[in-house]
Amino acid sequence: MKVFFLAIILTLTAVVNSQTTFVKNAVTKTPVSFATISFGDGRGTFAGEEGEFRFEASKYKDIDSLYISAIGFESKAVATEGLVSQVYLQPAASQLEEVVLTSEKKGKYKKKKLKETTHINYYNSWLPTVESEVAVFFERQEGKSTKVAQLWLPINSEKEFRKKGNMKFSTLFRIQFYKNNNGLPGDAMVHDDIVFRVSEQDDEMYELDISKYQIFIPKGGLYASLQVLGYADPQGKLIQTKKYNEIETPRGVQKVSITFRPLLPFTNDLPAQKTFVRRVFFNNKKWQVFDKSYNENSALVKTGHVNYGMGALLHVYNK
Protein backbone atom coordinates (compact mmCIF):
# COMPACT_ATOMS: atom_id res chain seq x y z
CA MET A 1 0.00 0.00 0.00
CA LYS A 2 2.85 2.36 0.83
CA VAL A 3 4.42 1.61 -2.55
CA PHE A 4 1.08 2.37 -4.23
CA PHE A 5 0.76 5.78 -2.54
CA LEU A 6 4.41 6.56 -3.29
CA ALA A 7 3.78 5.86 -6.98
CA ILE A 8 0.80 8.23 -6.95
CA ILE A 9 2.86 10.97 -5.26
CA LEU A 10 5.66 10.58 -7.80
CA THR A 11 3.19 10.71 -10.66
CA LEU A 12 1.53 13.86 -9.31
CA THR A 13 4.95 15.46 -8.80
CA ALA A 14 5.86 14.74 -12.42
CA VAL A 15 2.60 16.29 -13.61
CA VAL A 16 3.18 19.43 -11.55
CA ASN A 17 6.74 19.81 -12.86
CA SER A 18 5.80 19.01 -16.47
CA GLN A 19 3.77 21.43 -18.57
CA THR A 20 2.36 20.69 -22.04
CA THR A 21 2.09 23.88 -24.07
CA PHE A 22 0.66 24.44 -27.55
CA VAL A 23 2.11 26.97 -30.00
CA LYS A 24 -0.54 28.66 -32.16
CA ASN A 25 -0.91 31.28 -34.86
CA ALA A 26 -2.12 34.47 -33.16
CA VAL A 27 -4.31 35.38 -36.15
CA THR A 28 -5.84 32.07 -37.26
CA LYS A 29 -5.55 30.29 -33.88
CA THR A 30 -4.29 27.22 -35.76
CA PRO A 31 -1.27 25.17 -34.58
CA VAL A 32 2.23 26.25 -35.54
CA SER A 33 3.73 22.86 -36.37
CA PHE A 34 7.31 21.98 -35.44
CA ALA A 35 8.17 25.32 -33.86
CA THR A 36 11.65 25.64 -32.35
CA ILE A 37 11.72 25.74 -28.53
CA SER A 38 15.04 27.00 -27.19
CA PHE A 39 15.68 26.30 -23.48
CA GLY A 40 18.97 28.11 -23.26
CA ASP A 41 22.48 28.15 -24.68
CA GLY A 42 22.86 24.85 -26.55
CA ARG A 43 19.58 23.27 -25.43
CA GLY A 44 16.15 22.96 -26.97
CA THR A 45 13.53 20.84 -28.68
CA PHE A 46 10.75 21.06 -31.26
CA ALA A 47 6.99 21.22 -31.01
CA GLY A 48 4.95 18.48 -32.66
CA GLU A 49 2.55 18.67 -35.58
CA GLU A 50 -0.19 20.11 -33.36
CA GLY A 51 2.23 22.68 -31.93
CA GLU A 52 2.62 20.74 -28.69
CA PHE A 53 5.74 20.53 -26.56
CA ARG A 54 6.47 19.50 -23.00
CA PHE A 55 8.72 21.41 -20.63
CA GLU A 56 9.87 19.69 -17.43
CA ALA A 57 10.93 22.35 -14.96
CA SER A 58 12.63 19.80 -12.68
CA LYS A 59 15.14 18.94 -15.44
CA TYR A 60 15.94 22.56 -16.28
CA LYS A 61 16.04 24.37 -12.94
CA ASP A 62 18.46 26.98 -14.31
CA ILE A 63 16.13 27.98 -17.18
CA ASP A 64 13.73 30.84 -16.49
CA SER A 65 12.67 31.64 -20.09
CA LEU A 66 11.83 29.79 -23.28
CA TYR A 67 12.40 31.26 -26.74
CA ILE A 68 9.88 30.10 -29.32
CA SER A 69 10.35 30.64 -33.05
CA ALA A 70 9.08 29.39 -36.40
CA ILE A 71 9.65 30.39 -40.01
CA GLY A 72 7.17 33.11 -40.98
CA PHE A 73 6.49 34.21 -37.38
CA GLU A 74 7.86 36.69 -34.88
CA SER A 75 9.89 35.00 -32.15
CA LYS A 76 8.58 35.14 -28.59
CA ALA A 77 10.06 34.72 -25.11
CA VAL A 78 7.91 33.23 -22.34
CA ALA A 79 8.66 32.69 -18.65
CA THR A 80 8.92 29.11 -17.44
CA GLU A 81 7.36 30.00 -14.09
CA GLY A 82 3.62 29.68 -14.49
CA LEU A 83 4.05 28.56 -18.11
CA VAL A 84 0.75 28.98 -19.95
CA SER A 85 -0.93 26.18 -21.87
CA GLN A 86 -1.04 28.15 -25.14
CA VAL A 87 1.51 30.50 -26.71
CA TYR A 88 0.52 32.66 -29.69
CA LEU A 89 3.02 33.75 -32.35
CA GLN A 90 2.35 36.75 -34.56
CA PRO A 91 2.93 36.25 -38.33
CA ALA A 92 6.07 38.16 -39.35
CA ALA A 93 4.96 40.98 -41.64
CA SER A 94 8.48 41.49 -42.99
CA GLN A 95 8.67 37.88 -44.17
CA LEU A 96 5.13 37.74 -45.50
CA GLU A 97 5.83 40.74 -47.70
CA GLU A 98 8.74 38.88 -49.28
CA VAL A 99 6.69 35.82 -50.22
CA VAL A 100 6.18 35.60 -53.96
CA LEU A 101 3.49 33.15 -54.96
CA THR A 102 4.75 31.53 -58.14
CA SER A 103 1.98 30.19 -60.36
CA GLU A 104 2.49 26.63 -61.52
CA LYS A 105 4.51 26.48 -64.72
CA LYS A 106 2.49 25.10 -67.63
CA GLY A 107 5.17 25.07 -70.31
CA LYS A 108 7.53 22.31 -71.36
CA TYR A 109 10.49 21.36 -69.24
CA LYS A 110 13.33 18.91 -69.31
CA LYS A 111 14.46 16.83 -66.39
CA LYS A 112 17.90 17.39 -64.95
CA LYS A 113 19.26 14.78 -62.58
CA LEU A 114 21.87 15.74 -60.00
CA LYS A 115 22.99 12.35 -58.74
CA GLU A 116 23.43 11.76 -55.03
CA THR A 117 26.78 10.58 -53.63
CA THR A 118 26.64 8.01 -50.87
CA HIS A 119 28.39 5.14 -49.09
CA ILE A 120 27.80 2.81 -46.12
CA ASN A 121 30.94 3.57 -44.08
CA TYR A 122 29.89 4.23 -40.50
CA TYR A 123 33.06 6.19 -39.68
CA ASN A 124 32.63 8.66 -42.53
CA SER A 125 29.07 9.61 -41.58
CA TRP A 126 27.56 12.57 -39.74
CA LEU A 127 25.67 11.70 -36.55
CA PRO A 128 22.52 13.88 -36.60
CA THR A 129 21.39 15.62 -33.43
CA VAL A 130 18.44 17.92 -32.75
CA GLU A 131 20.86 20.84 -32.49
CA SER A 132 22.41 20.37 -35.94
CA GLU A 133 21.23 21.35 -39.42
CA VAL A 134 23.01 20.43 -42.66
CA ALA A 135 22.48 22.52 -45.82
CA VAL A 136 23.52 21.88 -49.43
CA PHE A 137 23.76 24.47 -52.23
CA PHE A 138 21.86 24.15 -55.54
CA GLU A 139 22.12 26.46 -58.56
CA ARG A 140 19.70 27.39 -61.32
CA GLN A 141 20.28 25.39 -64.49
CA GLU A 142 21.22 27.16 -67.72
CA GLY A 143 19.94 30.45 -66.29
CA LYS A 144 16.39 29.21 -66.77
CA SER A 145 13.45 28.78 -64.39
CA THR A 146 14.31 25.69 -62.33
CA LYS A 147 12.02 23.78 -60.00
CA VAL A 148 13.15 21.28 -57.36
CA ALA A 149 10.88 18.27 -57.97
CA GLN A 150 12.62 15.65 -55.84
CA LEU A 151 15.43 15.45 -53.32
CA TRP A 152 17.60 12.36 -53.10
CA LEU A 153 18.89 12.06 -49.55
CA PRO A 154 21.81 9.73 -48.81
CA ILE A 155 21.30 7.84 -45.55
CA ASN A 156 23.17 5.10 -43.74
CA SER A 157 20.90 2.81 -41.73
CA GLU A 158 23.86 0.66 -40.67
CA LYS A 159 22.37 -2.42 -42.28
CA GLU A 160 25.52 -4.48 -41.74
CA PHE A 161 25.53 -3.64 -38.00
CA ARG A 162 21.85 -4.41 -37.47
CA LYS A 163 22.53 -8.10 -37.99
CA LYS A 164 24.30 -8.07 -34.64
CA GLY A 165 21.31 -6.77 -32.69
CA ASN A 166 18.05 -4.88 -32.66
CA MET A 167 18.57 -1.39 -34.06
CA LYS A 168 15.06 -0.31 -34.96
CA PHE A 169 14.36 3.41 -35.17
CA SER A 170 11.75 5.83 -36.45
CA THR A 171 13.07 9.36 -36.95
CA LEU A 172 11.33 12.49 -38.12
CA PHE A 173 13.24 14.82 -40.46
CA ARG A 174 12.41 18.26 -41.85
CA ILE A 175 13.47 19.89 -45.12
CA GLN A 176 13.85 23.68 -45.28
CA PHE A 177 15.05 26.05 -48.00
CA TYR A 178 17.12 29.22 -47.68
CA LYS A 179 18.07 31.99 -50.09
CA ASN A 180 21.73 32.54 -50.95
CA ASN A 181 23.25 35.37 -48.92
CA ASN A 182 26.79 35.97 -50.17
CA GLY A 183 27.72 32.31 -50.12
CA LEU A 184 25.87 31.34 -46.94
CA PRO A 185 22.28 30.27 -46.23
CA GLY A 186 20.29 33.46 -45.67
CA ASP A 187 16.58 34.20 -45.26
CA ALA A 188 14.31 31.19 -45.02
CA MET A 189 11.94 30.59 -47.93
CA VAL A 190 8.41 30.34 -46.54
CA HIS A 191 6.55 27.19 -47.58
CA ASP A 192 4.39 24.48 -46.07
CA ASP A 193 6.09 22.04 -43.69
CA ILE A 194 8.09 19.35 -45.47
CA VAL A 195 8.40 16.59 -42.88
CA PHE A 196 9.02 12.87 -43.43
CA ARG A 197 9.84 9.74 -41.44
CA VAL A 198 12.81 7.43 -41.91
CA SER A 199 13.06 3.96 -40.35
CA GLU A 200 15.54 1.10 -40.34
CA GLN A 201 13.73 -0.24 -43.41
CA ASP A 202 15.17 2.61 -45.47
CA ASP A 203 18.75 2.42 -46.59
CA GLU A 204 21.33 4.13 -48.81
CA MET A 205 19.02 6.75 -50.37
CA TYR A 206 15.65 8.28 -49.46
CA GLU A 207 13.70 9.68 -52.42
CA LEU A 208 11.52 12.62 -51.39
CA ASP A 209 8.94 14.01 -53.83
CA ILE A 210 8.45 17.73 -53.19
CA SER A 211 7.00 18.73 -56.56
CA LYS A 212 3.73 19.94 -55.01
CA TYR A 213 5.52 22.61 -52.95
CA GLN A 214 6.50 24.67 -56.02
CA ILE A 215 10.09 25.31 -54.91
CA PHE A 216 11.84 27.33 -57.61
CA ILE A 217 15.54 28.16 -57.39
CA PRO A 218 16.20 31.94 -57.22
CA LYS A 219 18.79 33.49 -59.54
CA GLY A 220 21.44 33.34 -56.82
CA GLY A 221 20.71 29.70 -55.96
CA LEU A 222 19.27 28.17 -52.81
CA TYR A 223 20.23 25.91 -49.92
CA ALA A 224 18.25 22.79 -49.07
CA SER A 225 18.69 21.80 -45.43
CA LEU A 226 18.05 18.59 -43.54
CA GLN A 227 17.26 18.64 -39.83
CA VAL A 228 16.29 16.02 -37.24
CA LEU A 229 13.14 16.81 -35.26
CA GLY A 230 13.29 13.69 -33.07
CA TYR A 231 11.91 10.19 -32.84
CA ALA A 232 8.44 9.45 -34.23
CA ASP A 233 5.78 6.81 -33.74
CA PRO A 234 4.82 4.51 -36.68
CA GLN A 235 2.20 7.08 -37.78
CA GLY A 236 4.88 9.76 -38.06
CA LYS A 237 3.85 11.73 -34.96
CA LEU A 238 6.74 13.37 -33.12
CA ILE A 239 7.46 11.79 -29.75
CA GLN A 240 8.55 14.17 -26.99
CA THR A 241 11.72 12.41 -25.92
CA LYS A 242 14.90 13.32 -24.09
CA LYS A 243 17.29 15.15 -26.41
CA TYR A 244 20.33 15.30 -24.09
CA ASN A 245 22.30 13.01 -21.81
CA GLU A 246 23.95 14.31 -18.64
CA ILE A 247 27.60 13.22 -18.52
CA GLU A 248 29.93 13.57 -15.53
CA THR A 249 33.16 15.34 -16.56
CA PRO A 250 36.07 16.95 -14.67
CA ARG A 251 34.28 20.26 -15.33
CA GLY A 252 31.05 19.01 -13.80
CA VAL A 253 27.87 17.65 -15.35
CA GLN A 254 27.67 18.41 -19.08
CA LYS A 255 24.59 18.05 -21.29
CA VAL A 256 25.53 16.09 -24.43
CA SER A 257 23.24 15.91 -27.44
CA ILE A 258 21.76 12.50 -28.23
CA THR A 259 22.46 11.29 -31.76
CA PHE A 260 19.70 9.90 -33.94
CA ARG A 261 19.61 7.22 -36.62
CA PRO A 262 20.04 7.06 -39.57
CA LEU A 263 23.50 8.50 -40.11
CA LEU A 264 24.24 10.91 -42.96
CA PRO A 265 27.13 9.72 -45.14
CA PHE A 266 29.55 12.57 -45.93
CA THR A 267 31.75 12.24 -49.00
CA ASN A 268 35.19 13.29 -50.25
CA ASP A 269 34.26 12.65 -53.89
CA LEU A 270 32.74 16.02 -54.80
CA PRO A 271 34.97 18.59 -56.56
CA ALA A 272 33.60 21.67 -54.77
CA GLN A 273 32.63 22.56 -51.21
CA LYS A 274 28.84 22.96 -51.06
CA THR A 275 27.88 21.84 -47.54
CA PHE A 276 27.14 24.12 -44.59
CA VAL A 277 26.17 23.33 -41.01
CA ARG A 278 24.87 25.12 -37.94
CA ARG A 279 23.80 24.41 -34.39
CA VAL A 280 20.22 25.53 -34.03
CA PHE A 281 20.38 26.22 -30.29
CA PHE A 282 23.89 27.65 -30.13
CA ASN A 283 26.11 30.44 -31.50
CA ASN A 284 23.12 32.53 -32.61
CA LYS A 285 22.22 29.92 -35.24
CA LYS A 286 25.24 30.93 -37.28
CA TRP A 287 25.84 29.01 -40.52
CA GLN A 288 29.39 27.86 -41.26
CA VAL A 289 31.02 26.09 -44.17
CA PHE A 290 31.88 22.52 -43.15
CA ASP A 291 35.67 22.62 -43.28
CA LYS A 292 38.60 23.31 -40.94
CA SER A 293 37.14 26.70 -40.04
CA TYR A 294 34.18 24.89 -38.47
CA ASN A 295 36.13 22.25 -36.57
CA GLU A 296 39.69 21.32 -37.52
CA ASN A 297 39.56 18.36 -35.12
CA SER A 298 36.57 16.76 -36.82
CA ALA A 299 37.38 13.26 -38.08
CA LEU A 300 35.29 13.96 -41.17
CA VAL A 301 37.18 17.17 -41.94
CA LYS A 302 40.56 15.51 -41.39
CA THR A 303 39.74 12.83 -43.98
CA GLY A 304 38.23 15.27 -46.46
CA HIS A 305 34.65 14.06 -46.02
CA VAL A 306 33.28 17.60 -46.02
CA ASN A 307 30.21 17.31 -48.26
CA TYR A 308 26.79 15.79 -47.84
CA GLY A 309 26.04 14.33 -51.28
CA MET A 310 22.37 15.32 -51.54
CA GLY A 311 21.02 14.87 -55.05
CA ALA A 312 17.95 16.25 -56.80
CA LEU A 313 15.61 15.93 -59.74
CA LEU A 314 15.13 19.35 -61.30
CA HIS A 315 12.58 20.55 -63.83
CA VAL A 316 14.24 23.08 -66.13
CA TYR A 317 11.64 25.10 -68.06
CA ASN A 318 12.17 26.37 -71.58
CA LYS A 319 10.89 29.83 -70.69
Image (cartoon, rainbow, N blue to C red):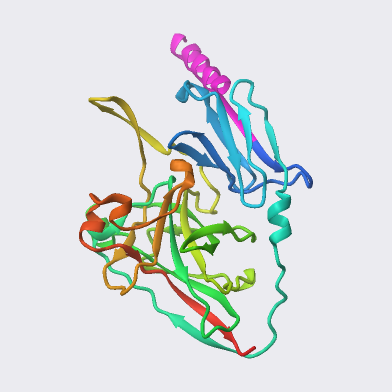
Q: Name the foreground residue: 228 vs 142.
A: 142
Residue 170 located left or right of residue 189: left
Residue 87, horizontal then vertical, whole percent: 68, 35
> Looking at this rendering, what residue extends furthest in the top direction?
2
Magenta residues span: 1-21
Q: Name the foreground residue: 127 vs 95.
A: 95
Residue 72 located left or right of residue 46: right
Q: Quadrant of the C terminus?
A: bottom right
Residue 276 located left or right of residue 223: left
The majority secondary structure of the magenta stretch comes to: helix
Where residue 22 sits, quadrant-wise, is top right
Residue 240 seen in render: no
Residue 5, horizontal then vertical, whole percent: 50, 12
Question: Which residue is depicted at the point 60% across and 73% down?
Answer: 216
Q: How many marks?
A: 0
In the depicted structure, whether residue 117 falls above or below residue 181:
below
Q: Name the foreground residue: 9 vs 284.
A: 284
Magenta highlight on residue 86: no
Residue 165, horizontal then vertical, whole percent: 25, 51
Magenta highlight on residue 13: yes
In the depicted structure, whether residue 144 falls above or below residue 10:
below
Residue 258, horizontal then vertical, whole percent: 36, 42
Question: Which residue is depicted at the point 72% across and 75% down?
Answer: 103
Question: Which residue is depicted at the point 55% across and 74% down?
Answer: 148
